[in-house]
Each structure stands twice: as structure tokens, then as C-alpha cells.
Image (cartoon, coloured by chain):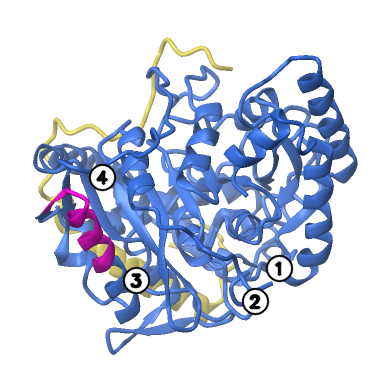
Chain colours: A blue, B yellow
């Protein structure tokens, strides 16, 4: 069931919000011991909110399509009175006394939060193999990672514990788990969604966005959370439109860029074949396919890493006196960041502006870019390397290779499911567009979105 | 540098950190040579901001 379908059922009194919440809580009770998607469950307050949602609808107060819909928040969004750990030991006892902007907006839209979702420690990693709260597992195969850092968000959505979840993306952390868990994940343009009230990872790279089961559901969440917020210095004063693609939206006439170099190199053969099939499908639907050459994406990735490592090290610095409270992978990255010279960080930020200008040329040639989201499907839990294109590579740089660049440039990027491997693991297609053109990539995503069929075998 | 700043990093870990940083610096330093003095960093500061 999608958010739209549930919203119709609520308004036609075929379902109540309390029933939806109870069903979600039962599913969490059954599946969470296996998937470990939740860190904190707020069952009582969820049922209370669901009762309120039902009473409001009965009294004619309709807050919109998210009214009465069960959702959950990645555990780095501040929730007043509810522990917000960032998946870390550092914040394990942190209870905020106010809500994040995104939480405020979703509350105002009537969504019913069921709790806080597990994630990679401090959002600084892509496996969600959390050493403090246990690893999140992939609903399609619990022996595999869900991706990260928003692994709990993706696992909860894919396993239908919730209709949608909040997430953050600093180097791919919305799109990687979306790809690996077969959900939709949208990283909006930098500045489109306020970061106010979130535990920061890297200030100039952190993006907040939704994970959902369908493109239209993701758009409905974006409708609720997009907008200017003076409490976030990077928040953009851009008009908020209705991001939900119209029924029967088409890609006819759109110029779709396919960056063969870099994005189609060193791919798992099944990933390549599924993404090329999606490109063919776009062409069949009337889009014009253009092979494009992008600026040096490997360089963009290196620059993005420099910025991320430096900013994270600055954020974490006050806590580095107690090294035992960090997982080994996070600590190794923090150490790298602490030793990067300031000149490298500043020059990376200067080059960021230069590449941003270079990328403008691309948007004169094409309307949207189509690429794989990740070069591989979900690796097994505990794997540190994978074989791609006959070469052994580390898991982390492999999974971030095709997503980090759009993060560095602040561009909107969407991951949608585009098939499965023979072993039943999801494959993701990435769509990226010009700044503040979320509507465009959502429209393309909705047009290319296949019927997801049955969910994970749980 | 780590020793000068008093970081408690084991020698083996430091080797690994140094290798990774060298690789990163090898990738980005040549790019920095292309920068002209007028290119400002993409960081944000506005003197009129009242968000506190």
C-alpha cells in the first residue's frame, strides 16, 4: 500500500490511523528482531497521535496526504523528549528539548512517528554495521548490508514497517541504502530542506530527504519538508511547488544524459544490464538519449572526501579524547580528517565552486542524467572488499563512487529501484538534475518507475 | 604532525592514515594549482544573518 492509497482509505473510513499504526507496530515487533532497523520505538505516543489524527479527520480537520500515516525518523533528527543518538556512543544519552525542522513539518502534516531508526555510527559510513546498536540487515537478504548511513530508514521502508522515513545524505547516505534495499530515495538540492535540529556530520555537505516506497510517496514527503527556514544558514529562499508528478507523466521530449565514462565503468554486470534496460525504456517512452562527458568525477569524489573528512573531524574533535567510544572504521576516518591541512580543505571548497560552474554547461545539453546508483548490489555483512570488473575494491569507495559527486555539487538526485539480481538483491537507477529541479527528476522517476511487485521475502 | 599535535594514534594506524591522505593529496593538489586568486571557497558567511 502506498501513502496515497492509505490516505484514500483513511478518508473513506475504510481504515483508521490507529489501525495503520497498530499494524505497523505489529510488523515492527515481528521484523525488527531480524532487521534491527529501530533504535527507539515510541509506540505509546504513536498510538496517541494516531488517535488524534482520527479525531481530527472525523471533525473535518484534514492536514493533507500524510495525515495519520506511520513514518519514522533517522536517529539524527532531534525529537523533543526522545533520545537522539546519531547511532553513536557519544550521543547515547542525548535527549533534545526541541524538534528538528523536518520533524516539526512532518508533525504539522499529521504524520505519525513510530520512533527513531538505526544508522551507521554518526552517519559516517555506508554499511550501517553499527557497533553500538548492532548492524541493520537488508530485508531482501539479512546476511547482506542495507547500505548506509540511513540503513535503518531504508530497511524500515523496504520491509513495510513504515510508509516513509527521514534520512540524510552527506556522501550518498540516502541513495546508497535506497539502491541496496529497493526503495526510492531522494537527496534534494542543498538548501531545499532545512538541516535545523539535526546532528551534523559535515555542515556543507549534509542534505536531508525522504526514503519511501514509490516516487510519488517520496514527493509527498518532500512537499511537507521543503521550504525556507531562517534557522539553517544554508536554507534557500526558493518557492516550494507541488513536487508530486501528475498522473501519466511522460518523459517524451526530455534530453536524458548518459555519462558512459566513469559512471558505466567497473560495474557488476547485472547492475549494468538493468540500468541500460532503464535507459532503453526511457528512449522507448520518447526521451532523447545523449551520451555526455562530465567533468572529472574521480576528482570531484576526492574533493568531496577532503571536505567531508575535515568537517567531520571538526565536529567530532571535542569527543576524540575518548577514542574507545568510536567504532574502528569511524575512528580511522576521523584521524584522517584531523590530519588534513586547512589549505586542502579551503582549496577543495574553492574547486567546488569551479566544478559547479563547469557543471552548468551540462544542463545546457541535457535535462537530466541517468546512471547506476551503486556499481554493485548489497555486499554481505562484514565484507571489506568486493570484486568489480575483475578487480578487488574496498566496499566503501565502491558504494560511494557514483553518488558522492552529486552531493559535492549539491544537485538533486533520486534513486529508484530498477530490477533485481538473479539472487534477488535490488538494483538502483540514479537520476540527477540541475539545482532545484526536484520536480523534473521526480517526474522522470515516476515515468520510469516499474511496478515494484512483491516486497522482500520476510 | 600527529605527534606534534599530541594525537594518540598507534603507529600502525598512523601508517594507514598517512597512506590514505597521501592518495587524497595526490589527487587534489594538482587541481588546486589551477585555481585563480579570485576563486572564493564555497563556504557560507553572511554578516547580516540572525539565526542564533
| Residue A454 picture quarter | bottom right
Q: Badges 2 and 1: C-beta atoms under 8 Å apart?
A: yes
Q: Which is more N-terminal, label 4 or label 1?
A: 1
Pair 1/4: label in front? 1
- Chain letter, disc 2 residue: A
Q: Badges 4 and 3: C-beta atoms under 8 Å apart?
A: no
Quick check: A414 above or below A50? below
Pair 4/3: label in front? 3
Q: Alpha carbon of mark 2 to alpha carbon of mark 3: how far?
A: 20 Å
Pair 4/2: label in front? 2
Q: Name the residue that disc number 1 marks.
A: A35
Foreground residue, A103 or B31?
Answer: A103
Q: How many marks?
A: 4
Q: Name the residue that disc number 3 marks.
A: A375
Foreground residue, B16 or A280?
Answer: A280
For numbered disc 4, what is the local secondary structure? helix
Q: Is residue A193 left or right of residue A112?
A: left
Position of residue A299 measured from the top left corner of the image (x, y, whole percent) = 22, 58
Q: Badges 1 and 3: C-beta atoms under 8 Å apart?
A: no
Residues packed near mark 4 inside 10 Å, few (<14), some (14 to 19) or many (20 plus): many
Which numbered tag is attached to residue A181? none
Does the magenta run of residues contain A288?
Answer: yes
- Chain letter, disc 3 residue: A
Foreground residue, A389 or A182?
Answer: A182
For numbered disc 2, what is the local secondary structure? loop
- Chain letter, disc 1 residue: A
Which numbered tag is attached to residue A347? 4
Q: Alpha carbon of mark 1 to alpha carbon of mark 3: how far?
A: 24 Å
Q: Which is more N-terminal, label 1 or label 2?
A: 1
Q: Name the residue that disc number 2 marks.
A: A142
Q: Which is more N-terminal, label 3 or label 2?
A: 2
Amino acid at each position: 500500500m502506498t501513502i496515497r492509497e492509505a490516505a484514500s482509505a483513511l478518508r473513506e473510513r475504510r481504515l483508521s490511523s490507529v489501525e495503520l499504526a497498530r499494524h505497523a507496530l505489529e510488523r515492527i515487533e515481528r521484523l525488527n528482531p531480524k532487521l534491527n532497523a529501530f533504535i527507539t520505538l515510541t509506540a505509546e505516543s504513536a498510538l496517541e497521535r494516531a488517535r488524534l489524527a482520527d479525531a481530527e479527520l472525523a471533525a473535518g480537520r484534514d492536514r493533507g496526504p500524510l495525515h495519520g500515516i506511520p513514518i519514522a525518523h533517522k536517529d539524527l533528527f532531534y525529537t523533543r523528549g526522545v533520545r537522539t543518538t546519531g547511532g553513536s556512543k557519544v550521543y547515547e544519552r542525548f535527549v533534545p528539548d526541541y524538534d528538528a525542522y523536518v520533524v516539526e513539518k512532518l508533525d504539522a502534516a499529521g504524520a505519525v512517528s513510530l520512533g527513531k531508526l538505526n544508522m551507521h555510527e554518526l552517519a559516517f559510513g555506508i554499511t550501517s554495521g553499527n557497533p553500538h546498536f548492532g548492524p541493520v540487515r537488508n530485508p531482501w537478504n539479512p546476511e547482506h548490508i542495507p547500505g548506509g548511513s540511513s540503513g535503518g530508514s531504508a530497511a524500515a521502508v523496504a520491509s513495510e514497517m513504515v510508509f516513509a522515513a527521514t534520512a540524510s545524505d552527506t556522501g550518498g547516505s540516502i541513495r546508497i541504502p535506497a539502491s541496496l534495499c529497493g526503495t526510492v530515495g531522494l537527496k534534494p538540492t542543498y538548501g531545499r530542506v532545512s538541516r535545523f535540529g539535526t546532528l551534523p556530520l559535515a555542515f556543507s555537505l549534509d542534505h536531508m530527504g525522504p526514503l519511501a516506497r514509490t516516487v510519488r510517496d517520496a514527493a509527498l514527503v518532500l512537499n511537507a519538508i521543503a521550504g525556507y527556514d531562517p534557522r539553517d544558514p544554508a536554507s534557500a529562499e526558493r518557492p516550494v511547488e507541488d513536487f508530486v508528478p501528475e498522473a501519466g507523466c511522460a518523459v517524451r521530449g526530455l534530453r536524458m544524459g548518459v555519462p558512459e565514462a566513469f559512471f558505466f565503468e567497473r560495474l557488476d554486470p547485472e547492475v549494468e544490464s538493468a540500468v541500460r534496460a532503464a535507459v532503453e525504456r526511457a528512449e522507448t517512452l520518447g526521451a532523447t538519449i545523449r551520451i555526455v562527458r562530465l567533468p572529472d568525477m574521480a576528482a570531484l569524489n576526492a574533493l568531496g572526501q577532503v571536505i567531508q573528512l575535515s568537517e567531520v573531524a571538526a565536529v567530532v574533535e571535542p569527543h576524540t579524547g575518548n577514542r574507545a567510544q568510536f567504532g574502528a572504521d569511524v575512528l580511522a576516518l576521523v584521524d584522517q580528517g584531523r590530519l588534513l591541512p586547512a589549505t586542502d580543505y579551503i582549496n577543495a571548497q574553492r574547486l567546488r565552486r569551479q566544478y559547479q560552474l563547469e557543471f552548468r554547461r551540462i544542463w545546457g545539453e541535457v535535462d537530466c542524467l541517468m546512471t547506476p546508483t551503486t556499481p554493485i548490489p548489497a555486499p554481505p555483512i562484514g565484507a571489506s572488499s568486493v570484486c568489480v570488473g575483475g578487480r578487488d575494491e574496498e566496499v566503501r569507495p565502491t558504494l560511494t563512487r557514483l553518488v558522492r559527486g552529486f552531493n559535492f555539487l549539491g544537485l538533486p538526485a533520486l534513486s529508484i529501484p530498477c530490477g533485481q539480481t538473479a539472487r534477488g538483491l535490488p538494483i538502483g537507477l540514479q537520476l540527477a538534475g540541475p539545482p532545484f529541479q526536484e520536480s523534473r527528476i521526480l517526474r522522470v522517476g515516476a515515468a520510469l518507475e516499474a511496478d515494484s511487485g512483491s516486497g522482500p521475502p520476510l | 604532525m600527529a605527534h606534534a599535535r599530541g594525537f594518540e594514534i598507534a603507529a600502525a594506524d598512523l601508517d594507514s592514515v598517512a597512506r590514505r591522505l597521501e592518495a587524497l593529496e595526490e589527487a587534489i593538489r594538482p587541481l588546486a594549482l589551477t585555481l585563480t586568486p579570485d576563486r572564493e571557497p564555497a563556504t557560507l558567511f553572511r554578516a547580516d544573518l540572525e539565526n542564533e
